[in-house]
Amino acid sequence: MTSAITVALGERSYDIHVGSGLLSRAGHILRPLLAAPKVFVVTDENIEGLHLEALKESLDDAGLDNHGVVLPAGEQTKSFPHLESLLDAMLEARCERGTTIIAFGGGVIGDLTGFAASVLLRGVPFVQIPTTLLSQVDSSVGGKTGINTRQGKNLVGSFYQPRAVLADIDVLSTLPPRELKAGYAEVVKYGLIDDPAFFDWLETRGVAVVAADAQAGRQAVLTSCRAKARIVAADERESGQRALLNLGHTFAHALEAEGGYGELLLHGEAVSIGMVLAFDLSVAMGLCPAADRDRLVRHLHTVGLPVCLPPLPGGEWSVERLLAHFGKDKKVKDGRVTFVLARGIGQAFLSPDVPAATLKNVLDAAIG
Ligand code: NAD
Ligand code: MG
């Protein structure tokens, strides 16, 4: 069964299709949306071996002329050198304004490909076929694209919405368990932001989601995409409420930067710890009952996500160094860091007024 959710953005509106067996129907679903029967598929070497054949077959069946390129897997691919070679490959393949670019992979492929599509010939249409839980519930929806630079992550990019998103739950069965769990942290985030009933549901079905159960996975992806679609439709360029999606992320980015991106912690693992720290901070500020923080910790622990800082290889965590990263956050405005705090599970809000001393105490306690 397939369900569709619309991201309502006027003439840039698009549907997110969620279901099983979508890959084999991708050609027929996409065909009516395309300006011309020509697509260019971008994927990585892991997905190539597992799922590319199924997608190509489906595109062939629908009579779509398809070429493509396979890039190395990993965060390093979101870089200027790979952007350049990707644009080269697209031009070599004679992509035109009417050619649709398909990003077939996780967030790395989605972010890089979306950015390339936004600048190729001043913008060509693109479609997301996300293959990780993280990309299905988060990065493929909402139109943020980009690459990393020497100065940091995602510092060069664009807002560029896809024409459609196809989230096939079946492909999650080949995802390494650690990646699946990391993506699950972003699912929990939607419950924490404003959907306590979803959090209740996750407490009973979350274990099935991280065990790649297709039915539970479908429900989790659907609810997450509905939440993201609603938030993005209300605030496409993050002038306000879209920042709620950064719950746990200010902490997470600091932990990732200190631990070496992807080395010590996957992004979702850092988000898991970051969400706990955001609740710790909310409790310390007297805004949130400690019972809600404890409930969050219990759930994350049950599904196998980290809830406290792991030892830092070859060093010690430093509060000063963590605090220094907050100041570099993309979301800093006039030197003030806006935190996402919570009055409880499902009651997140933005606060530019976090007392420095309380923040420091929370980090001191976390470092232990
Ligand atoms: P990823 O794309 O690196 O994928 C993780 C790993 O899983 C890779 O090794 C990949 O080859 C492999 N893989 C992908 N699908 C698979 C499958 N079905 N079976 C087996 N292996 C598979 O990482 P990710 O976690 O999907 O995305 C992380 C990126 O997303 C980061 O760069 C982050 O900045 C970005 N991101 C962007 C947004 C946004 O709004 N644009 C939001 C969140 C994260
Ligand atoms: Mg995230």
Image (cartoon, rainbow, N blue to C red):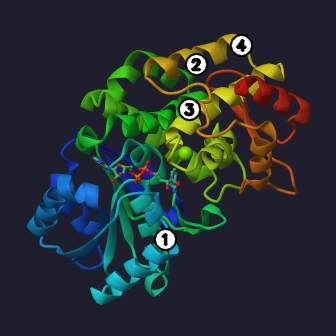
How many residues crowd mark 2 within 10 Å: few (<14), some (14–19), many (20+)? many
Q: Looking at the image, is mark 2 or mark 3 earlier in the sequence?
A: 3
Q: Looking at the image, is mark 2 or mark 1 earlier in the sequence?
A: 1
Residue at left offset 76%, top offset 25%:
282
Residue 39 vs residue 111, the one in the foreground? 111
Q: Is residue 365 visible?
A: yes
Alpha-carbon span between mark 4 and mark 2: 11 Å
Residue 212 vs residue 224, the one in the foreground? 212
- Residue type beneath disc 4: Ala
Q: Secondary structure at mark 1?
A: helix
Residue pointed to by mark 2 = 297
Q: Residue 133: percent from the left, percent from the top?
A: 38, 42
Q: Secondary structure at mark 4?
A: helix
Residue pointed to by mark 4 = 290
How many residues crowd mark 3 within 10 Å: few (<14), some (14–19), many (20+)? many
Residue pointed to by mark 3 = 272
Q: Secondary structure at mark 2?
A: helix
Q: Residue 34: percent from the left, percent from the top?
A: 29, 72
